[in-house]
Amino acid sequence: MLKNRKSLKTKILFSILSILLLSTTIFTVILFSVSNNLVEKYILPQYQENLGLNMNNFNTLFPADLVNEAKENEATYEELLARTNDFQKELEIENAYIMSKVDGEEVILVLGNAEEYLTPLAFTPDQAQALQTKELILSDIYEDDYGKHISTFLQIPGTDSVLGLDADADFISDMNTTLSVLAFSVAILTMIIGAVLAIFVARSIVNPIKNLVDHTEQVAQGDLTKTLASETKDEIGRLVTSFSVMQQQLQTTLGHVNETAHHVA
């Protein structure tokens, strides 16, 4: 076993595979980092921008007087609900709704595709923040029992109500997973191909040397009858050719010695 560890073939394989493993690891890390950077800096901001544009369009559907009236007039609520349902269906938004305060209590004023009129529900921190500013509030990606989402909120001027849109964010997680699997798959495939090439290279170098070693051992034992042909023209092939020439010269020399000894006898 120790002999096998010290063999030339093992050393060549170990060297090639070590370099291949290091380079593949570096490549995988770079690919993974680039893909994550692509999602974080380009894909996600574009998605957030589109969500903000949708919110601006959603905001035009709800004048302040109608929102305030809907808190006490169920017919007005039904009109706002119909607008919300149409908008949610048209843009394929997960959830579209209006959160409001009625007599100091935080409630759902309108929720698309649901009958949640004046259902008590506490504001989230993002919704509470939106109520204090006229700026668009965009949440981080969050996860619940239904998957991953991203939400945006906007105050309705002249009211104590906040518009809300929830959008599916599973595709971002799926994209990161896909890119990760792709990176690791490329790394594994590269390692397999590299290992096969390493074995082929090691054999192409070691096998001729092994044949030469076996042949020299036979010559060392006095067998000069067998010959070894060179199949390549590289350094190993030249070494085999030189050894063959040396063996022929040794045979000739021994022949002369035997002939001389015969004459002397």
Image (cartoon, rainbow, N blue to C red):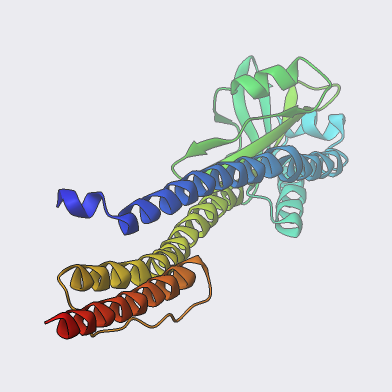
Write down the quadrant of residue 135 in the picture.
top right
Q: Nearer the viewer, residue 107 or 15?
A: 15
| Residue ID at (53%, 70%) | 234
Work out whether 23 lies above or below 138.
Answer: below
Query: What is the quadrant of residue 218 in the picture?
Result: bottom left
Question: Is 27 in front, or is 61?
Answer: 27
Answer yes or no: is residue 96 visible: no
Q: Is residue 55 above or below residue 154?
A: below
Q: Is residue 3 visible?
A: yes
x then y, percent, for residue 15: 42, 49
Q: Left or right? Give the position of 77 relative to 135.
A: left
Q: Would residue 223 appear left or right of 153 to someone viewing this image?
A: left
Q: Position of residue 122 (x, y in %)?
A: 55, 22
In the image, 73: left or right of 56? left
Identity of the residue furthest to the left in this view: 265
Q: Which residue appears farthest toward the front when viewing the image? A: 264
In depth, the one of 243 and 77 nearer the eye is 243
Q: Which residue is drawn at the image coordinates 40% and 63% (left, top)?
A: 202
Question: Residue 210 placed where, x, y %?
Answer: 30, 68
Name the quarter where the C terminus is drawn: bottom left
In screen coordinates, is 233 left or right of 37? left
Total numbered labels placed on residues in the image: 0
Residue drawn 76% across and 43% down?
A: 42
Q: Position of residue 88 (x, y in %)?
A: 71, 52
The answer to which of 86 and 2 lies nearer the viewer is: 2
**Residue occupying image coordinates x 63% and y 38%:** 150
Q: Quadrant of residue 230?
A: bottom left
